[in-house]
Amino acid sequence: MLASLVMLAAPTLVVLGASFTSGNIITFPPQGFSLKWYGEILGAFELRQAFLRSLYVATIATLLAIPAGLFAALTLARAGSPPLVVERGRAVEDRVRDVEAFHRDGVLDPESNVQFGEGGAGTFSDGKLNTGIKDPLCRGVLDELVRFGAPSDILVKARPHVGTDHLRGVVRAMRQELLDLGAEIRFSTRFIGWETSAGSVCAVRIADSGGREEDLKAAAVVLCPGNAARDTFTLLDERGVGLEAKPFAVGVRIEHLQTMIDRGQYGGRP
């Protein structure tokens, strides 16, 4: 789902997590610059708009088109600052063909599979992730998903679930709005580094599928790596960016014979 918007004391590198944070401020001390997360900034619309407009001094690069990255890019584009979106995988319709080829022929494309590509893992994995927090941002995210084609019942269900079959269309609709608002999207392009000047990010380095590298000037960077981009985590760690694992709970369902349940619950007496 959408992560909290990251706001910096001085525009540097923004790392957007793949889950909500609320009611707290966490500070990381990367080498040469500071990074702060403000969990409730999206709740103040006027402040959000003013902040986003203040970033419109150069290219804003949003890296990886998973849902967190797509929502971040849409927020910027709607505020009048259409970003450049860089995605290491392919567009969702191309991913479908790549994944089908893997299932059929066993040929794995390391950059376009169930983990990497537009929409993230949720466009192929029907696993259910939910948040139980009472953050007002949750409703806004659900409203947006419905507007882009998700089933409307997610607005009233206790545990809303979009479903893989709907999410692919949602992602395509989000991409189209980004393009209509003037954003640029580059698929099959990897984030491989960044440059700083006076303690702030001034450029990001990317590489296309052919290995050709390019430096892009950027006043701010929103990095949304998802869970599988281990090489990106390694790069961030090597460059001194503070990283912290976010805990989550996992539930499982186990089927037993009714007789076993009765014996455990009632001592064998139904």
Image (cartoon, grey):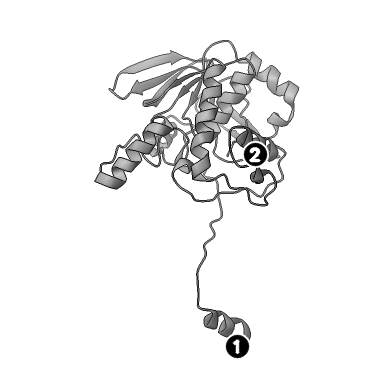
At 54% from the left edge and 34% from the top edge, which residue is drawn?
170
Q: Which residue is mark 1?
A: 267
Res. 220 in view = no
Secondary element type, mark 2: helix
Residue at image mark 2: 142
- Compared with 113, 30 (above or below) is above
Relative to 108, is 57 on the left or the right?
right
- Which corner quadrant of the image does residue 234 belong to? top left
Mark 1 vs mark 2: which is more N-terminal? 2
Q: Amino acid at mark 2?
A: Leu
Q: Is residue 253 left or right of residue 53?
A: left
Q: Position of residue 237 (x, y in %)?
A: 44, 35
Residue 175 screen position, x and y as percent? 51, 26
At a point 40% along the width and 41% down the height, the residue shown is 115
Q: CA distance from mark 1 to mark 2?
A: 45 Å
Question: Where 259 sits versus 237, above or below?
Answer: below
Expressed as whole percent of the image width and height from the top left, the position of residue 153 reads 65, 46
Q: Which residue: 60% across, 88% down?
A: 267
Structural crowding at the residue carrying mark 1, measured as other residues with C-alpha within 10 Å and reported as few (<14), some (14–19) or many (≥20):
few
